[in-house]
Image (cartoon, grey):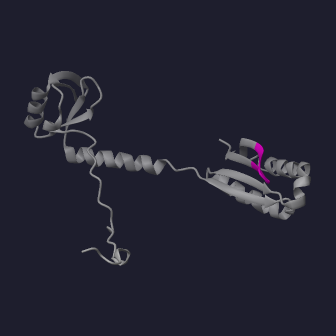
Amino acid sequence: MALRFPHLLPTFRLRYPPKKVEHRFRINEQIRSKEVRLVDGEDQIVVPIEEALRRAQEQELDLIEISPNAVPPVCKILDRGSYLYQLKKKEKRAKAGSKQTEVKMVRFGFRTDQHDLDRLANQARGFLSEKHLVKIGMRLRGRELTNQEYAREKMKKFVEGLADAAEVEQPMRRQGNQYMVIMRAKK
């Protein structure tokens, strides 16, 4: 029997998406290679997989494949739980240290007065101090398009005012009825 109004049926969505199971490395019997490079402290030796597994069992630890693409694969004898913990800790530290740079926009018009330009310059300096890229745009409307030389000079003055805090990443260019400059904080 076909439903008469299927679009009125309730849709069920998972509130939380299922967790992805990531297997970053193989352990113990999952290692497929016939021989492995066993790293034990400072020593590196190439041994058959059976020998490496026997050594891991003697120490009551796991044989973990660290570098599967090497020839032969590199393995270490470690506790799997503590190894996973160290990996997660390292990833968290790397993620915290790398901040995405955003492009912040500062716009003004052809007839914007000096006081407002100073306020926008301070706002751009704030963005630059946070290591963001700043895209500066000046929009021209109607008859303002006929006086483009004045607009270029005004944009150059604004960029020169920020020269102490920033350097030009992309020079001034025209995009339709706007002039754009992208600036980056000085290193």
In front of the other: 35 or 16: 16
Q: Which residues are magenta?
A: 172-180
Residue at screen point 19% across, 43% down: 79
Q: Is residue 174 above or below residue 52?
A: below
Q: Locate residue 173, reporting x and y percent.
A: 77, 44
Give yes or no for residue 175 being in the magenta stretch.
Answer: yes
User: Which secondary structure is most common in the magenta stretch?
Assistant: strand
Q: Quadrant of residue 115?
A: bottom right
Q: Locate residue 11, reporting x and y percent.
A: 34, 72
Q: Is residue 4 above or below residue 71?
A: below
Q: Residue furthest front?
A: 1
Residue at screen point 39% across, 50% down: 92
Residue at screen point 22% across, 31% down: 75
119 horizontally vs 9: left or right: right
Position of the C terminus by quadrant: top right
Count the marks: 0
In front of the other: 171 or 115: 171
Q: Quadrant of residue 47?
A: top left
Q: Locate residue 18, reporting x and y percent.
A: 29, 60
Position of the N terminus by quadrant: bottom left
Residue at screen point 77% across, 62% down: 119
